[in-house]
Amino acid sequence: MDVSTVRWLSSPRGWAALRDLPAYDPATELATQQRLRAAGHPAEQVAALLLQSRLRARARDKFAEFADGMLFTPDGLEQSTRLELSASHAGRYAAASLATVHDLGCGIGSDAMAMSALGVTVLGVDSDPVTAAVADANLRPWPDSRARPGIAQDFDPPADPIHARVGVWLDPARRTPGVADVAGRTRRIFRLDEMSPPWSYVRAVATFVPAVGVKLPPSFPHDEVPLGCEAQWTSYAGDLLECAVWWGPLVRREGRTALLLGPGRAPVEVDQTMAEETTGLARALSDLGPWLYEPDHAVTRAGLLGAVTAATGGVEVDSGLGYVTSDRHAEVAFARRYAVKEVMPFNAKAVRAWLRARGITGVTIKKRGIRLDEDQLRRQLGVGRKAGSGGQVTLVLTRVGGSPAAIVVEPA
Ligand SMILES: C[S@@+](CC[C@H](N)C(=O)[O-])C[C@H]1O[C@@H](n2cnc3c(N)ncnc32)[C@H](O)[C@@H]1O
């Protein structure tokens, strides 16, 4: 797809052609293609319409019904922020009363759209002209917000960004265009200074503009959190998706925080004030209580396990492994609770005997701090993933007091 095809797609005739497409179905794609050709569309328009139809179907997971009013590129969709997270980002800019946000590397404009919907004017640039044209088309409901081709590093900050109420948002590319992995996805980048634009540039922008936010990988190291900033790890439906760093008026709670989002649930925020500074530790199997708590990954990655020990009166099962044991049956919105059925030193034979004696044939294995081949262990234990006619349990394999331990649990 080139820029002129994107322009055609976003013209009244293009939108009309998109609107008239049937719901995407691979089985009827060929027939749709022939119908579009017969209606006089040139080959590049037909290819673009079919691509949009395919991508819109895929995009429904991230954008729900809004996908039907958007244009996409394959890479742009893959890298875009899902709706619930972009709404959360946008809320910070709106709450800080910013008038204009420069989105430096705007992709297809998912974050830019969410900010625009909250009344913030967004000026986006993207180094890829097709992606910029797609973002500009996606911003059409908000005529003041625009996207154009451009390089983030060419951003010229205003002399007085506070007075002008100007902020900056960056969501650096963490994939290398044109370099695909075995699954056909573009290769992921993990080093902060290999991102584009790099972390060093993001920090430089924050020295000129007070209101800056950036989306970073969840692996963002704690010792990189700049002084006075908030680093927020966010999960959606239990999947850890990002760490966003916020400066100046965009900070809600200085330090490390976690945000848990998901369908049909109210957002849950956890911060350092809720967390004990030092957490106790189980030293032996006999220290394990009847309840095991598994914090959401955002809480664990934000280093806020102390919030789980504080809320449950418990101790860590092993240092940094992300499980908390307690005698208390507590309601914790940011951790999953399990009832402990059995604890034993980890030994495949003993675990197999325990499972057999109880007719358990389905086991969910969770391992932390222990290296083993899960398929091989299943063969040793003689169990599958799903129970079939027998019982089902979760087997937590971890360390207690430095030794491998097996904890049999059930969600409770
Ligand atoms: C992760 S995507 C942004 C996604 C966007 N936040 C969204 O939700 O749709 C990063 C984008 O940055 C662009 N990019 C990479 N390096 C850039 C640079 N130096 N200047 C401007 N854009 C850049 C890429 O083309 C890509 O579209």
Image (cartoon, rainbow, N blue to C red):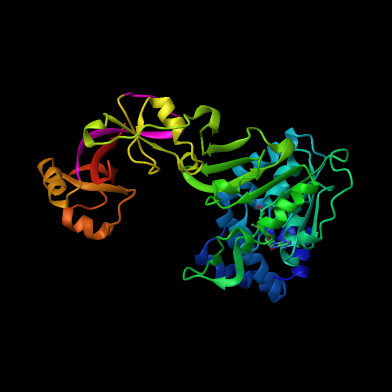
Above or below, comparing residue 161 to residue 2 in the picture: above
The reply to whether residue 389 is in sight is no
Q: Residue at x 25, y 31 (%)?
A: 287
Point out the stretch of residues depicted in magenta.
Answer: 328-345
For the residue pair 16 and 47, the one nearer the viewer reads as 47
Q: Main secondary structure of the magenta part?
A: strand
Q: Nearer the viewer, residue 78 or 70?
A: 78
Label tally = 0
| Quadrant of the rendered image containing residue 132 | bottom right
Q: Position of residue 262 (x, y in %)?
A: 51, 39
Look at 19% across and 58% down and name the residue there.
379
- Horizontally, residue 157 falls left or right of residue 335, namely right
As drawn, 268 above or below 166: above
347 with respect to 218 (left or right): left
Query: Is 52 situated left or right of 169 in this image?
Result: left
Q: Position of residue 212 (x, y in %)?
A: 73, 45
Can residue 168 be seen here? The reply is yes
**What residue is drawn where x is 24% and y is 40%?**
407
Whether 340 is drawn above or below 31: the answer is above
Whether residue 276 sits left or right of residue 224 in the image: it is: left
Q: Nearer the viewer, residue 251 or 184?
A: 251
Q: Residue furthest bottom?
A: 43
Q: In the image, ligand 1 is in what quadrant? A: bottom right
Residue 373 located within the stretch drawn in magenta: no
> The C terminus is located in which quarter?
top left
Residue 352 % position (x, y):
14, 49
Please tell me in which quadrant of the rendered image residue 281 appears.
top left
**7 shown above or below 319:** below
**Residue 152 image position (x, y, % from top left):** 76, 59
